[in-house]
Every structure is written in structure tokens, then in C-alpha cells.
Amino acid sequence: MPTNNRISTSPVRGRYFKPRSQYHESIILKLPIELLLGLFQYLDYSSLLALSLTCQFLSQVMKEQGWRDFVRANYRHTASVQERWSFLSWKQRARDAERINQAWSSHHFTAKTLNTPWPQKFHSVLALSAKRLVVAAGNAITSYRFGFDTNRGSSIVFKEGTYTIFPSAHGFDITGIEFLPDGGKDETLLVSNHSGSLVRIQLPTPHRGQPTFQAKRTAQYVTGSNTIRILKVTGTMGVAFSVDGKASVVNTASPWIPPATAIVGKKAWSAYIETGSSSPYIAVGTDEHVAVHSFTNGLLSAEPSAVLGGPGRPTPVYCVGEFIPGGNPNIVASGWYDGKVRVHDLRSSQRDWLSESSTPSKKRTTLAPVMTFSDPWRSFDPIYSLAVRGRMEDKNDSSGGNGMPHQHHFLTAGSALHSVVCLWDVRSPSRSWSVYAPGGDRSPVYSLKAEGSRIWGATQWRAFVLDFAPDAPKTSFPFVQDNAAMKEPPTYVHFPQASVVG
């Protein structure tokens, strides 16, 4: 067989491969490389690894493009481990992605608490970025920074410090906290509290030997509200919902501009902003249902464009969010007081009737859910928080990082009792399960943030993490005495009551 050492001048997705005349002829090697890469999408990690060992040509194809395609299709973004991720090759990333997926399916994780119990009960709130996790409890926030230990080859989570924002007085507890764009520094936040204050702060550089620091206020916004319950941010736009149903839309980059206000009606418990839809909207969880309001040019409509129904009677909705990261923006997930997580499709035509008053004639049609999830062992525990695994994202990927949907889409919810976190695999509900958060608190899970390999949560006493990453046992977390003697928290498969309409 003739030998040709030249590199082929035909690029394949920006890569060059040696002519196949150098390799032993076989049926699979006669296929176009584009077709080979398309077929590789249907193979799992073990099959691709075996394939890469068969000959030099396939090994080169996998090295140059195959492993990257596998990661695009199977990895779910974990912002907190990006520093470690940057040290791995595409083959190592593919191995990690496979092990993370197996850990989610086999319920294998490392559980850690991040702090000793707070001195009193707090309605805690979390905010997550690529560089840090901040936990708001009372009138202060605690920042945890993410890093990477090159010697151990594992991630690091260390406590930066505790920052005070509002005076230590009754009624000044933080109700909402969100990161604002600041050029990737992840040190600028928008914070709201019970007194109606809405401020922008910057986290100062911590100094050793000081237990607490004063956060720097860089702007304050006028909302005209006595109590802010919900705070959401999209870009530089912040939306604050008061206890009396008033919504204030502020431009965080221009604090001197008065906010645009709208009365959404009922008491707001939760909210979700979707700007990726052709018709941007805000879904507001009220004390009766979920009201969807159009949100265009920074203006919120007073009347809802759709109402998402629940059990057939007015029921509070404590959390609203997306269903699948990067999925269709018209699908909304919500957690209800009756212990159900309902999924609504705004394009659906199925409607229910919901009576809003004691007058039988005063009724309105509501959008019926297309899916419903619940844990039969905790069917009467309200759902307090909701989160989904993060989407795949790679800033170095010129294609935008959009790959095939992941095979496991987990929807996580925080229960109102005994700090239970429920995990539903929406593509295979029989694989779903629940876990008691570390610490054993008899408390609601007030806040959840989910990534590809981690679930961050907070109860009324402490913050915690469930880590599914392969380097989780080696990861350095802040030292907490409870973690030294703590065993893996108990889990149970609850064979959830999942119903699908249509």
C-alpha cells in the first residue's frame, strides 16, 4: 500500500487528517469523516473509547473532533468548576462527563454543609456565578469562592468572608440577591430587603483576621414599596415585586432613572423572567396561580396574557422557573403549595376552569399543565424552591456550545419539611429519587441552584452542597465540624407520581 506523509488539505470542521491510504482499508474507514462523526453521536463513552483504540486514524479523529462532540452532547455546564475544567483535555472532559452522568443516575454524590448553624432561623437566599456562591441570611451575605488546586487536581471551595449590608434591626432581612454584569469580576450584586430597600453593592477584597466586612453600596433605587419579597435580574434590568403585588422595573446601570411600575394584582411569591422567547414574559407565582405578563422594552403588562392553572382551586405558587435549560422558552415549571411540580406549555390549547371568588359567575380559563410531578411520600409538603441542571456552555467553542440534548434532565425541588430535595428525571420518571440535605434540619429548603455536577441549597439554618463530580471526595470545602462525622445523607427512590397530558 503506498504511503503518503502529507497532511490532507481538506479541512474537516477546521481540522486536518492524514490521508487514509496510510491505514488498513476497512468498510468504516471508507465512510466520509462527516458521516463518521455523525454516527459517533449514537455511541456511549465506552464504545467511543474502544473505537479510538482500533487504529491510528480513528484515534486521531476522536482526538481532534470526536471527544469534543461527545462533550458537547453530554456535558451539562458547571460554572463552579470551570477553572479545573480548563486544565483537562477533551478526552478527560468526556470521561468526567460520563462519570457525572452515572453519578446522577446511581445517586452517588458527596454532601457537605458550608457553615455551622446560624444563631437563629433565616429565610436564606442563594446567588450563583462562575466565580462564587453568595448566601444571604438575615442582614448579611457570606461569599464562597471557587478555585482549583493544581497539586491535588481537584476543585476548591473556600469562604471569602461575611459582608453586612443593612443595619442589624428587625425587618431588614435580605429577601433577594442577584449578580449584575461587571465584566466577569462577579463582585457586583443587586440586593433587596423587607424594608423595601433596593441597593447595588460591590464586594470588597477581604482581609485576613477580620470576620465581617462592610459591603460597598454603589447605588440605591427608589421602588416606593414597603416590603420587597421577590427580586429577579436579566442583564442590567432588575424587577422587584412587593408584598402588595406591585412590580418595579429598574435599570441597574442608571439608578437616577425612576422605575417603571405595574400592579400585577395578587400577592407575589415567586417570579421567572424569560427574554429568549419571541414574546418575552415574566411568570409570577401568586397566592392563587401563575400569571404570565408580557415584558417588552422594560415594561411589564398590568394584565396577564395567560394564567397557568393548578389543582382547580386557588393555591399559592412558591417557585417558578425554566423546565429544561436551553430548551423551548415557552415551557414553564412551577412548584405549588399542594406539593406538586407542574409543567405548562404556553403553546398548549388545553384549558381548565378556575373559580376566583365565591361568585360562581366570576370564573376564568386557565392553562392546564402538560406534566405533573410529585413525591408520593411527601405529597402534602409544599414545594418551596426549584432548580434545573445548567446548560452546556463553552466560551472557547466557536459553534456556541449547542449540542444534542442531554440524556438526563433532572428537575430538582426543595420540600417544605425535613430539608428534603426531590430529583425528577423528566425523561424517565421511574429513576427519580429524593435525598435529605446534610445537617438533618427540620426545615424547608428555601433556595436551590443546580449545575451540571452540583446542587447548592440553603435551609433556615445553613447552606449545603450535593456534589456529583468525580473529584468531589478530594474537593476542599470550608471546614465545618458537622462534616467530619457526617455520613452520606439518606436517599430514597420515591417512584414519583408523574402524569403527562396529551
Image (cartoon, rainbow, N blue to C red):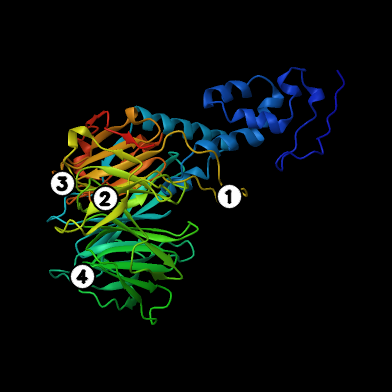
Q: Label 1, on which residue?
A: 400
The picture places residue 160, in percent across and down from the top left corner, at 32, 57
**In the displayed structure image, the side of residue 333 where residue 383 appears, left or right:** left
Secondary structure under badge 3?
A: loop
Circle 3 residue: 443
Does the rendering let one see residue 180? no
| Residue depth check, mark 3 versus mark 4: number of the one nearer the observer | 4
Q: Splitting the image into 4 quarters, where does residue 122 fall?
A: bottom left
Which of these two is toward me, 128 or 346? Answer: 346
- Looking at the image, tell me whether mark 3 or mark 4 is earlier in sequence order: 4
Query: Tag 2, which secondary structure?
Result: strand
User: The disc labelled 4 sits on which kind of residue?
Assistant: Thr
Q: In the picture shown, does residue 329 fall above or below 154?
A: below
Circles 3 and 1: CB distance less than 8 Å?
no
Q: Name the mark on residue 353.
A: 2
Quarter of the image for residue 203 reads bottom left
What residue appears at the point 26 percent right and 78 percent down from the top-left corner?
224
Three-letter code, disc 1: Gly
